Amino acid sequence: MTALITRDELAKEIEAGSVIVIDALGAEYYAKAHLPGALNLVEEDVESEAPRLIPNKDAAIVTYCSNAACGNSQQVATRLENLGYTNVRKYREGIQDWSEAGLPLVS
């Protein structure tokens, strides 16, 4: 199972520019709102797009989706790990938690 990251930890890493954030929701959801700096990458595109989006397999990566009930972030994280990415974590609570905490979103 992928390691987890808290909202506060993720906010600090985004502010520091020390993490690649992956929105694992479909493009229509990504277009409506996503975390600052997040890239859109869905499960079926991981093998083809990850090498281009994230060339460094040791980069700090965090995946997220809607909320704890959404499985997309784990599916994308697992595929990244299977491709050899070594520093993948998951923000399990997702964009719902981020938004409810009053943190900024990009649309």
Image: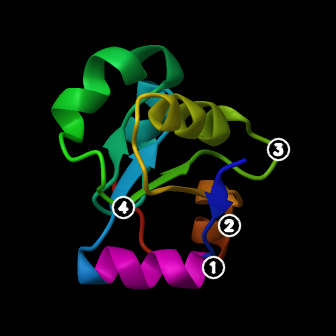
What residue did someone put label 2 on?
97
Numbered disc 4: secondary structure: loop
Tell me which label, 1 or 3, sits earlier in the chain.
Answer: 3
Q: What separation in Å lies between label 2 and label 3 (alpha carbons)?
A: 12 Å
Choose between 43 and 89: the one closer to the eye. Answer: 89
Tell me which label, 2 or 4, sits earlier in the chain.
Answer: 4
- Label 3 amino acid? Ala
Q: Nearer the viewer, mark 4 or mark 3?
A: 4
Numbered disc 1: secondary structure: loop
Q: Position of residue 26 (x, y in %)?
A: 49, 26
Q: Are marks 1 and 3 in contact (CB under 8 Å)?
A: no
Q: Are marks 2 and 1 in contact (CB under 8 Å)?
A: yes
The residues colored magenta run 7-15
Q: Which SS does the magenta portion mostly show?
A: helix
What residue did someone put label 3 on?
69
Task: Locate residue 45: give its quadrant.
Answer: top left
Q: What separation in Å lies between label 2 and label 1 (alpha carbons)?
A: 6 Å
Tell me which label, 4 or 3, sits earlier in the chain.
Answer: 4
Q: Is residue 56 in the magenta section?
A: no
Q: Nearer the viewer, mark 2 or mark 3?
A: 3
Q: What separation in Å lies between label 2 and label 4 (alpha carbons)?
A: 21 Å
Decide: few, some or many residues near mark 2? Use Cα within 10 Å; few <14, some 14-19, many ≥20. Answer: some
What residue did someone put label 4 on?
60
Q: Is residue 85 above or below residue 49?
A: below
Q: Position of residue 68 (x, y in %)?
A: 78, 52
What residue did someone put label 1 on?
101
- Label 1 amino acid? Ala
